[in-house]
Amino acid sequence: MRQSLLLATLLCAGAVQATDADRVGEVSTAFKLFGPNHKIVIEAFDDPRIKGVTCYLARPKTGGIKGGLGLAEDPSHATLSCHQVGPITLPAKLKESEEVFDVSTSLVFKEQRVVRFYDARRNALVYLTYSTKLVDGSYKSAVSAVPIMPWG
């Protein structure tokens, strides 16, 4: 009973994180006879503290029976592209590095995260995506910079 409750809680937590992004599209990368195909999904999310910035994250999604049941671990690589989509006003204080988005990429203990940095010298916002794992994170990462420009 206790294990079922823990599993249900973890599944619900993963679903909540995934709702922070809008799915833009997906492409199948490998056919699976049983369960969904392997695919690459593209998600869009807005920076929650910086209005006027939208990021697009493309990441692999494992299919097959395990993937269909939510038990598979997705590969640890992704690409990221962030853009100014409106006027940008920086808050008075920004953390040196602040997590702006994460999505669960396995049943437990693994996430794809996006962190924001501010490059004051170049007046740009820099976004980094990387994979975390309970024991060992991944060196695979992607970065995208958004120069803060006048709008309109």
Image (cartoon, rainbow, N blue to C red):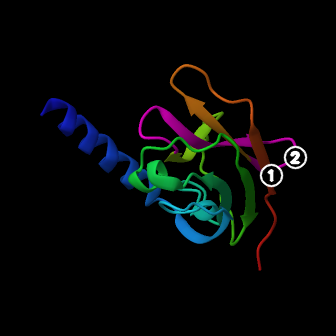
Q: Position of residue 34 (x, y in %)?
A: 48, 60
Tell me the residue at 70%/44% (across/down): 77
Q: Which of the image's four quarters has the C terminus?
A: bottom right
Q: Amino acid at mark 2?
A: Arg
Where residue 52 sits in the image (x, y, percent)?
65, 66
Please check the rendered image and state whether residue 119 is part of the magenta-colored stretch, yes or no. yes
Q: Which residue is mark 1?
A: 145
Does 26 sit above or below residue 66? below
Closer to viewer: mark 2 or mark 1:
1
Q: Where are the magenta residues, as a range?
A: 105-126
Q: CA distance from mark 2 to mark 1?
A: 10 Å
**Looking at the picture, how far across and down is residue 98, in whole percent?**
59, 39
**In front here: 27 or 130?**
27
Residue 129's label in the rendered image is none
**Is residue 93 among the parts visible in the rendering?**
no
Mark 1 residue element: strand
Residue 76 image offset from top left, x and y in percent: 65, 40
When the figure is inspected, residue 46 is found, relative to residue 151, above or below; the finding is above
Can you identify the residue that label 2 sits on?
Answer: 122
Q: Residues within 10 Å of mark 1 (few under 14, many from 20)?
A: some
Left or right position of 38 against 82:
left
